[in-house]
């Protein structure tokens, strides 16, 4: 993998659909559970959850793309919250479609053909892992990209909701570097059998998203 490819995949201009989601922030904010002062804690909790409940599926599919279908099915069983489950499916389809059109290489096209040929939920984390393997992104970088996407998406949602301004959002992102590194190190050896929900309150807020009177985001 070249650094240029990683920068392209991590860039906010890469149209993978992540910015349509707030990762539960919109519901938590509307219910008065998050404000500018508590945003950093919400983001920190989201990092830990992504490490324990998302990265294992990224790495499992990265390590064994041939087993993508059962890994995807296990991810579907893990994501019991209907809003989170639906958001993961939407992001997964957006991600794989963008990768297919942006990088029409033999390995990527073969993966996309295999995904379409089989029934499945097509969740974001396993599809990201398998596609990054096809793009020759190294294993740690794949996990790093997934975690960064969650944090960047959450902070972008906070800015668009008016919780913080753009520069304050960037400050929160910069201050999460140590949290990201600790979570990354801990998540690299977690298996899908050990995947866990570490922020049950955030899960409950996310589940309430469909009942909001007005919504800017899909989740």
Image: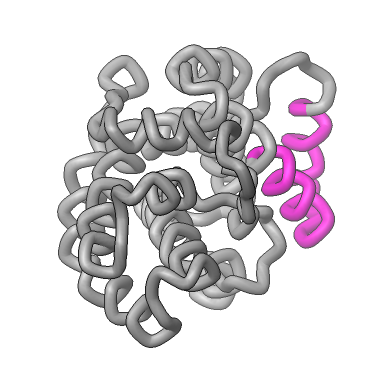
Highlighted range, magenta: 92-115
* Closer-to-camera residue (105/51): 51
Q: Is residue 4 above or below residue 27?
A: below
Residue 160, picture quadrant: bottom right
On screen, residue 83 versus residue 54, left or right, reads right
On screen, residue 149 versus residue 124, left or right, reads left
User: Residue 105 appears at what percent x and percent y?
Assistant: 78, 53
Question: Magenta: predominant secondary structure element?
Answer: helix
User: Residue 110 appears at what percent x and percent y?
Assistant: 78, 36
User: Residue 192 appears at what percent x and percent y?
Assistant: 36, 21
- Looking at the image, the residue that sits furthest to the front is 213
* Closer-to-camera residue (161/141): 161
* Closer-to-camera residue (11/142): 11
Which residue is painted at 25% across and 40% down in the image? Answer: 187
Residue 139 appearing in the image: no
* Closer-to-camera residue (26/75): 26
Q: How is the image coloured?
A: one colour
- Looking at the image, the residue that sits furthest to the bottom is 167
Residue 87, picture quadrant: top right
- Say whether residue 153 is magenta: no
User: Residue 2 appears at what percent x and percent y?
Assistant: 53, 71
- Say whether residue 101 is magenta: yes
Residue 127 appearing in the image: yes
The tally of labels here is 0
Name the quadrant of the C terminus.
top right
Which residue is painted at 69% across and 38% down in the image? Answer: 90
Residue 190, picture quadrant: top left
Which residue is painted at 76% across and 14% down in the image? Answer: 119
Which residue is painted at 29% across and 80% down in the image? Answer: 171
């Amino acid at each position: 993998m070249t650094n240029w490819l990683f920068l392209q995949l991590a860039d906010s201009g890469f149209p993978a659909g992540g910015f349509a989601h707030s990762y539960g922030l919109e519901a938590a904010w509307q219910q008065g559970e998050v404000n500018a002062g508590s945003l950093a804690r919400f983001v920190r909790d989201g990092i830990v959850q992504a490490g324990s409940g998302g990265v294992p599926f990224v790495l499992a599919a990265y390590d064994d793309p041939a087993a993508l279908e059962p890994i995807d099915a296990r991810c579907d069983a893990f994501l019991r919250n209907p809003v989170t489950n639906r958001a993961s499916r939407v992001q997964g389809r957006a991600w794989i479609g963008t990768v297919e059109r942006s990088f029409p290489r033999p390995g990527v096209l073969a993966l996309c053909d295999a995904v379409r040929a089989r029934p499945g939920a097509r969740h974001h984390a396993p599809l990201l892992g398998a596609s990054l393997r096809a793009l020759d992104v190294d294993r740690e970088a794949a996990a790093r990209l997934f975690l960064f996407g969650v944090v960047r998406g959450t902070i972008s949602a906070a800015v668009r909701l008016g919780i913080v301004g753009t520069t304050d959002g960037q400050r929160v992102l910069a201050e999460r570097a140590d949290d990201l590194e600790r979570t990354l190190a801990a998540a690299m050896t977690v298996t899908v059998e050990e995947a866990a929900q570490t922020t049950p309150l955030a899960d409950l807020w996310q589940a309430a998203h469909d009942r909001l009177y007005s919504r800017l985001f899909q989740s």
